[in-house]
Amino acid sequence: MELWAMDEHRIGLIPILRRVWAPRGKRPRAVVRPRYEWLYLLAFVHPESGRTSFWILPQLTAAVFGAVLAAFVEEQAFNEKKRLLLVLDGAGWHTGDQVRAPPGTTLIPQPPYSPELQPTERLWPISNEPLANRSFNTIQELEAVVAHRCCEMAEMQDFLRGLTFYYWWPSTQPDTHIV
């Protein structure tokens, strides 16, 4: 049995602005050209090991989420013998009638209005780093940068474990929490 967490993040052509260092007396500049096009980044994280699985989608509905969930379960080879417990928030596309948990999967909703309990929430500032203070001409440019960042993050298992493995998160191995 493995306990994973999942969350979604909407990223678009509206710029992400962050503070930057600048010489005294010089005002930093960031070119912005906001447009209203979006894509969705879904992340599954196994906090105990730091393993992740990312999905970049042009839209997100209950049917799309159900398809992604089924593909994730197949990718990770979960079944009746190797069970998946998946913690997710109460977004509408997680709870619709179109969402059916695949065999061997149990969906665990987190309490309402409690993003601080969701380990996956801690991934979003890291995923946004290459997007900060940049302007993209097309959604395809943005998607390429996000995809590259997801590949980098998938290799950062120890870092992501430290970021997402809360002291109170249940462990399947004895003494895996850092004291």
Image: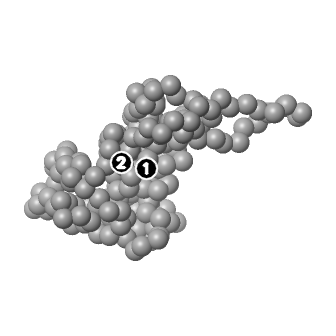
Residue 120 at x, y = what percent? 42, 56
Residue 70 at x, y = what percent? 17, 51
Compared with residue 44, is residue 110 higher up or lower down, i.e. above or below? below
Report the front residue among 170 and 20.
20
Most extreme residue toward the bottom is 111
Report the front residue among 113 and 163.
113
Q: Is there CB contact under 8 Å for labels 2 and 1?
A: yes
Label 1 sits on what residue type? His
Marks 2/1: CA–CA distance: 6 Å
Q: Crowding at label 2, few (<14), some or many (≥20) Cα neighbours within 10 Å?
A: many
Report the front residue among 147 and 163.
147
Indicate how the structure is coloured in the image. Answer: one colour
On the question of residue 69 being in view, the answer is no
The answer to which of marks 2 and 1 sits earlier in the sequence is 1
Q: Residue at x 14, y 58 (%)?
A: 102
Q: Please identify the quarter of the rendering in which residue 144 is found.
A: top left
Q: Residue at x 68, y 31 (%)?
A: 30
Residue 7 at x, y = what percent? 38, 55
> Could you say which disc has been placed on residue 143 in the image?
none
Mark 2 lies on a secondary structure that is strand
User: Which quadrant of the rendered structure holds the N terminus?
Assistant: bottom left
Q: Mark 2 sits on what residue? A: 42
Across the whole image, how many numbered discs are drawn on residues?
A: 2
- Seen in the image, is 125 located left or right of residue 39? right
Q: Mark 1 sits on what residue? A: 9
Label 2 sits on what residue type? Leu
Q: Please identify the quarter of the rendering in which residue 151 is found.
A: top left
Q: Crowding at label 1, few (<14), some or many (≥20) Cα neighbours within 10 Å?
A: some
On the question of residue 146 being in view, the answer is yes
- Seen in the image, is 91 located left or right of residue 34? left
Mark 1 lies on a secondary structure that is strand
